[in-house]
Image (cartoon, grey):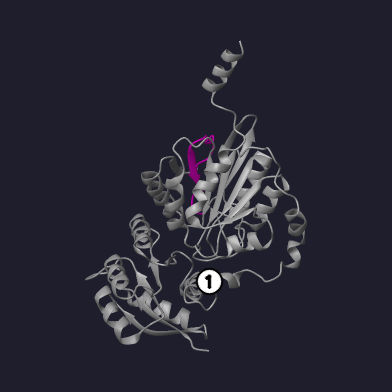
Amino acid sequence: MRRIRILVVDDSVVVRRLLTDALAADPSLEVVGAAADGRIALARISQLNPDVVTLDVEMPEMDGLEALAAIRKSWARLPVIMFSTVTERGAAATLDALSLGANDYVTKPSNVGGATAAMARIREELIPKIKIHCGAVGGAAQVPSAIPAQASVTRSIALTAPRRGCRVEIVAIGVSTGGPNALAELIPQLPAHLPVPVVIVQHMPPIFTKFLAERLASKSQISVEEGSPNQAVEPGHAWLAPGNFHMILKREGSVVRIETHQGPPENSCRPAVDVLFRSVAASYGAGALGVVMTGMGQDGLRGCECIREQGGRVIVQDEATSVVWGMPGFVAHAGLADKVLPLGQMAEEIARRVREFRAPAPVRVAERQFELR
């Protein structure tokens, strides 16, 4: 089988060596070259014909954003994975890169305990993304052809339809790979006076989630912010789980508040979709609407089980519009989704479901009462 050919672009000699050594340990990968800035990278792409490029954000001469724009003009389908620092500047530039057409990103390891630990982090986070975006592990390949044994409970839950006549009281969204762009399409389409709150887990590190929330807020009709402890969730607002913290909801009588904690990662993630969805199911019962969108792995599967156990509803993004059909694919194959939709139809579906079973506006009720008199 032909190995995946990788071009490493970074202005740091140390980082280039670290990446090369970490990637070379996988027999299915081959680092065919390296470049210290964007201009050199463009020449090397023409010479080496790589299958994928890892691209540093901050470089002299031509930085990662300029290089990405040039790559997209000449090599529209060449996978590009940004390799960025966990800083405010790095986070902002990475989100810019994703909006400009970068396929994905990985953050540079820092304070992980030396070169060996750094290489392990690179292998764990970067190699799966390289394989996904190069087709060595397709999105559908993440979904088993048969439901695994541990999902036996799921099969029985799937036979129970969501409760009829129960209105949606909250929308809970889980998303990972490809999520920033998917959210940038979905959230701005939600109506300004959405009568329910929205809570979101996007797998992202600290700082990145803050910038993502700010960008979504600047484009959306509803307010969007990072979740913080003791906030009461309210209609027409969305809260994004902060990086490196699980976000949960807790009911106190008629008020539901946000809590965050740094419990163990679930599905290798913190924040994790399963953690949020379990708390949503516990706080809202049959009033919960779970939404699972593009992402690797199966985070969200167990949380959707909890939502369905309580009589709530679940919709997922379809394979054709997902960058990776892992998370939504697992939920769909387990029979937990009552609808599978392309990204462009999800906001309309959410708004429609939220409108169902809601009482008429007070003024109209008053008019009816007046007529009866």
- The image position of residue 316, as x and y in percent, is 58, 56
Q: Is residue 253 left or right of residue 200?
A: right
Give the residue pinned by disc 1.
Answer: 124
Q: Nearer the viewer, residue 345 or 11?
A: 345
Q: Which of 308 and 201 is in front in this view?
A: 308
Q: Is residue 188 above or below residue 256?
A: below
What residue is rendered at 33% in x and 77% in y? Answer: 13
Element marked by disc 1: helix
Residue 34 quadrant: bottom left
Stretch of the chain drawn in magenta: 228-244
Quarter of the image where the C terminus is located: top right
- The image position of residue 293, as x and y in percent, is 54, 57
Which residue is situated farthest in the bottom direction here? 1
Which residue is situated farthest in the left direction here? 61
Q: Which amino acid type corresponds to the residue marked 1 in the rendered image?
A: Glu
Residue 8 quadrant: bottom left
What residue is rendered at 73% in x and 62% in y? Answer: 151
Q: Is residue 43 left or right of residue 256?
A: left
The mark total stands at 1
Residue 55 quadrant: bottom left
What residue is rendered at 59% in x and 15% in y? Answer: 369
What residue is rendered at 75% in x and 59% in y? Answer: 155
- The image position of residue 189, as x and y in percent, is 44, 46
User: Mark 1: few, some, or many residues within 10 Å (few <14, many ≥20)?
Assistant: few
- The image position of residue 299, as x and y in percent, is 60, 59
Q: In this view, does 48 lie to the left or right of 2?
A: left
Magenta-drawn stretch, dominant element (helix, strand or loop): loop
Task: Tell me if residue 229 is in the magenta stretch.
Answer: yes
Q: Is residue 249 above or below residue 43?
A: above
